[in-house]
Image (spheres, rainbow, N blue to C red):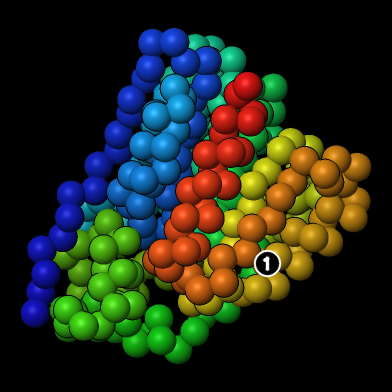
Amino acid sequence: MVKEKNIHSPFVEELENSNTMVIFIHGILESPNQFNNLSRIAIDNNVSVCAILLDGHGRTGEDFANSSLRKWESSVETEIKKYVDKYDNIILVGHSMGALLSIDYYFKFNKKIKAIVAISTPLNIRVKFNIIISSFKIALGIIKDYDTLTNYAYNAFSISNCNMLTYINWIPRYIDLFRIIRRIRNKINEVNLPMLIVHCMNDELVSNKSIKTYEKSFEYNNKENNKKIIRLTNSGHFYYEEKDLYILEKEFRDFVTRKIS
């Protein structure tokens, strides 16, 4: 059964009396839709929001294949530049590769970027067998209602109209992903700003070693007390168990409101 894809569009809501803009950055193959809940929390606390759609996303597999890391970076930089002179504070919130891009752009706009929320940061990759099977099911259009992981992954992906040949053409994009992973791992210890780091212990793609990489970087960072690591025990890369979701949303709310108070 081939299911109809959701519409994956960027969104922005600027509040008249807000001095803070939260910019949401999704991961590779993913969608701005995954930030709907967090963006509503920010808005309810008088914080403006913007969710980026990275180049090549929200369209076809061919469009994604013809994108690149440089174009993804351009998508992020274009949005940051729109708000860097309008707001006193910019907070970057990234999921997966979006977390890597958030850290990368801290170094380019560190005078205005005041905090980062990094969710499921792929500093170390470990691909589990179950997500490989789910990916093949998505590629073949075999998506059953009872197949929870496959449905979560399918709804998170913003790429449509793919075939097996298209996936082969994606190889350079995954090489791009590993390029930015290597870049961020080499300079993560230089990050000197408040961070909320969220890691899902059942992540199908991001190894738990990513937390150890963060913790090791803090040994060389003299401002380690402005970083907090949250471990979500029962959640994965594309989904949050109910209790974990409550923790994530509470920590996000506390972090955002604390940094703008």
In the rendered image of this protein, does residue 178 appear above or below residue 93?
A: below
Q: Nearer the viewer, residue 8 or 164?
A: 8
Q: Amino acid at mark 1?
A: Ser
Q: In the structure shown, which secondary structural element does the residue marked by tag 1 occupy? A: helix
User: Seen in the image, is 44 located left or right of residue 247?
Assistant: left
Left or right, 89 with reference to 227: left
Pick the quarter of the image with the C terminus.
top right
Residue at the spot x=82%, y=56% of the render? 217
Could you tell me if residue 10 is visible in this image?
A: yes
Category of crowding for the residue at label 1, using alpha-carbon neighbours closer than 10 angstroms: few (below 14), some (14–19), many (at least 20) = some
Position in image of residue 180 (x %, y %): 60, 55
The x, y position of residue 196, in whole percent, is 64, 47
In the displayed structure, 121 sits above or below 135; it is above
Q: Residue at x 26, y 73 (%)?
A: 151
The spot of residue 3 in percent (x, y) is: 11, 69
The answer to whether 159 is drawn above or below residue 87 in the figure is below
Q: Within the image, what quadrant is residue 208 found in?
A: bottom right
Residue depicted at x 21% and y 83%: 146
Residue at numbered disc 1: 210
Q: Can you say whether 118 is above or below 61 in the image?
A: above
- Asked whether the viewer can see residue 70, the reply is no
Quadrant location of the N terminus?
bottom left
Q: Nearer the viewer, residue 9 or 81?
A: 9
Question: Which residue occupies 32% across, 61% down?
Answer: 156
* In the image: residue 216, left or right of residue 123: right
* Front residue (pair 208, 110): 208
Quadrant in which residue 12 is drawn: top left
Q: Position of residue 200 (x, y in %)?
A: 55, 67
